[in-house]
Image: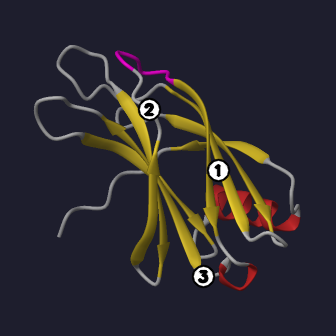
Amino acid sequence: MENKLGDICFSLRYVPTAGKLTVVILEAKNLKKMDVGGLSDPYVKLSLMMNGKRIKKKKTTIKKCTLNPYYNESFTFEVPFEQIQKVTLIITVVDYDRIGTSEPIGRIVLGCTATGAELRHWSDMLANPRRPIAQWHTLQEMPEKS
């Protein structure tokens, strides 16, 4: 259990007629401590990817000194219906650092190429147009920088 990175809750909503994907970052809990002081200053970064390229990025505010941040922040991406099967949404929880480099704690990858709970959540969103579907996810390790 040592390497648990924490959990994040967010809702996904897609309106095919308007081509709008809305992500509401709700909260995170039990985030892994990244600082010596024992608390992190987490924020959440959202990247919309297509064919391996980032087409849009957004981020939440920074929550100071907490491992259980509450955000309730909404983000909308324009994704036409014919592209929704082709995009990947990467949600990364990052520990903000004023002095050094902000360190990513973990991430969630969503989209048609995702697997497990992430793919289920994405499929539920597509199956229930216009309805926000909220779900908890366990953060995954960041890929090694090559």
Residue found at the far left of this picture: 100
**Disc nearest the viewer among 3 and 2:** 2
Residue 23's tag is 1
- The residues colored magenta run 64-69
Instruction: Say which amino acid is labelled 2.
Output: Thr
Give the left or right position of residue 119, taking residue 96 as reference: right
Instruction: Say which amino acid is labelled 3.
Output: Lys
Vertical position of residue 67 compared to residue 50: above or below: above
Vertical position of residue 74 compared to residue 51: above or below: above
Q: Earlier in the sequence, mark 3 or mark 1?
A: 1
Give the left or right position of residue 92, taking residue 14 as reference: left
Between 129 and 61, the one lying in front of the other is 61
Label 2: which secondary element? loop
Instruction: Say which amino acid is labelled 1.
Output: Val
In the picture of the structure, the residue carrying the numbered disc 3 is 86
Was residue 130 drawn as part of the magenta stretch in this picture?
no
The picture places residue 121, in percent across and down from the top left corner, at: 72, 57
Between 121 and 83, the one lying in front of the other is 83
Label 3: which secondary element? loop
Instruction: Residue 79: name its quadrant.
Output: bottom right
Give the left or right position of residue 133, taking residue 116 as reference: right
Instruction: Residue 101: name its quadrant.
Output: top left
Instruction: Residue 128: name its quadrant.
Output: bottom right
In the picture of the structure, the residue carrying the numbered disc 2 is 61
